[in-house]
Image (tube, rainbow, N blue to C red):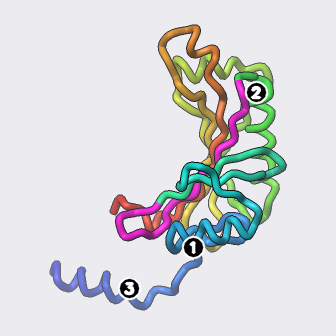
Amino acid sequence: MKNLLLTLLILFAITAPAQEVIDFMGIPIDGTQAELFGKLTEKGFQETDDSSVLKGLFESLPVEVLVLDNVRDKVYELDIRHEVGNDEALAIERYNNLLQKFRNDPKYNDTYSELIPEGEPIGEKLRSDIHHYTACFTQSGKHGYVRIKLFKTNNWKDEEWYKLASFVIEIEYVNAANSPIG
């Protein structure tokens, strides 16, 4: 019985139609880190002193781009990070604007997203209740997902350090097929 099930699973995997992977700015989240870096530099992103990070503009905001690969040197995730500073109102505004753009783009399906109410004390919530705000989207007909997070760097227990920490918005484009887990 196990052999029959395994054979059917292999047959399904071989005969199943290939599904396109999720993309960022038309670039599939696949291949090697060097290939993806090359395509991103063609789109205007620039190298930094850190060989695993590019910098540039996304949605007219300064960002850093990190590309994560697995043990087989296949890219499985591209992270875009925008440091907002420690202005709560600005962090809420930028996070909500980004969610609205994804919600209004027909290329994306809203799996889960919740706008943050204006004036919500997100600094307190990030410190005590939750570690980050999260939204999740998929791209129609493509394998993978996009996760958008708002969090605060250096989530120290010391009050003075915490006040200095920056809010960060991170967008993760994930190709789960290349994940190092599973």
Residue designated by label 2: 117
Cα–Cα gap, marks 3 and 2: 46 Å
Mark closer to the observer (2, 1):
1
Query: Which residues, given as a range, are shown in magenta?
Result: 69-85
Q: Residue 177: x, y in percent?
A: 45, 69
Q: Is residue 166 visible?
A: yes
Q: What amino acid type should be assigned to the residue bearing mark 3?
A: Phe
Q: Depth check: give the residue in front, 104 or 80.
A: 80
Q: Measure the alpha-carbon separation of dots 2 and 1.
A: 40 Å
Please state which amino acid type lies under the numbered disc 1.
Glu
Q: CA distance from mark 1 to mark 3?
A: 30 Å
Q: Amino acid at mark 2?
A: Pro
Q: Residue at x 63, y 73 (%)?
A: 141
Mark 3 surroundings within 10 Å by alpha-carbon count, few (fewer than 14), some (14 through 19), many (20 or more): few
Q: Is residue 158 above or below residue 145?
A: above
What residue sits right under mark 3 in the picture? 12
Picture residue at 58% right of the left edge, 68% below the top: 29
Looking at the figure, which quarter contains the C terminus?
bottom left
Q: Which residue is mark 1?
A: 35
